[in-house]
Image (cartoon, helix red, strand yellow):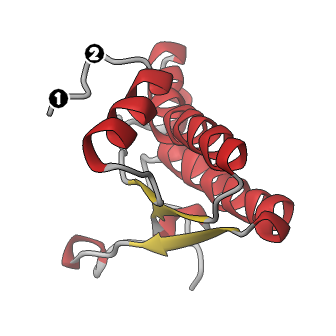
Amino acid sequence: MSLKNLTLFEMVNTVVKEFGSLDILVNNAGINTESSSHEVTTADFDRVIAVNLWGAYLCVLETIKHLLSLHRPGVMINISSVHEIIGRLMYVSYSISKGGMENLTKTLALEYASQGISYQRHWLRSNAHANESRLDR
């Protein structure tokens, strides 16, 4: 099943039709444009925010609407990055988008816990990050 050209509303409905229900959403999209902070173009910045933050928010929004309409519990998992709290050289737009993901997850968890919708945020960390210069030292 390809969801590439579907609207988010159609995506949710297609998942429900194909699998019978929608109980969990995993947001795992992320892009970056590596550039010095003063050289990031507004187009590149907007693209990173659109994929990393807007994309996650809009997927969550449609899933919440679906779950609430059926009075069903559900789980939302937002895959983020250590760069939501640890700065990384040349990654300003990425770090901002992941910081937004942290607050999105916390806010939604508070807002929808009483309706049985839980939110989790997970970091993926690879060996590529092991020797980076960090602001937390």
Q: Is residue 6 above or below residue 30?
A: above
Q: Is residue 82 above or below residue 95?
A: below
Look at the numbered disc 2 and give the secondary structure of its residue.
loop
Residue 34 in sight here: no
| Residue 97, quarter of the rendered image | top right
- Observer-nearest of 5 and 91: 5
- Observer-nearest of 126 and 26: 26
Question: Residue at the spot x=47%, y=14% of the render?
Answer: 43
- What percent of the width, then of the height, locates residue 59? 52, 38
Image quadrant for the N terminus?
Answer: top left
Q: CA distance from mark 1 to mark 2?
A: 8 Å
**Which dot marks residue 5?**
2
| Residue 84, quarter of the rendered image | bottom right
Residue 85 in sight here: yes
Q: Is residue 89 above or below residue 120?
A: above
- What percent of the width, then of the height, locates residue 124? 35, 72
- What percent of the width, then of the height, locates residue 18? 26, 40
| Contact, mark 1 vs mark 2 (Cβ under 8 Å) | yes
Q: Which residue is mark 1?
A: 2
Instruction: Indicate the amino acid at tag 2.
Output: Asn
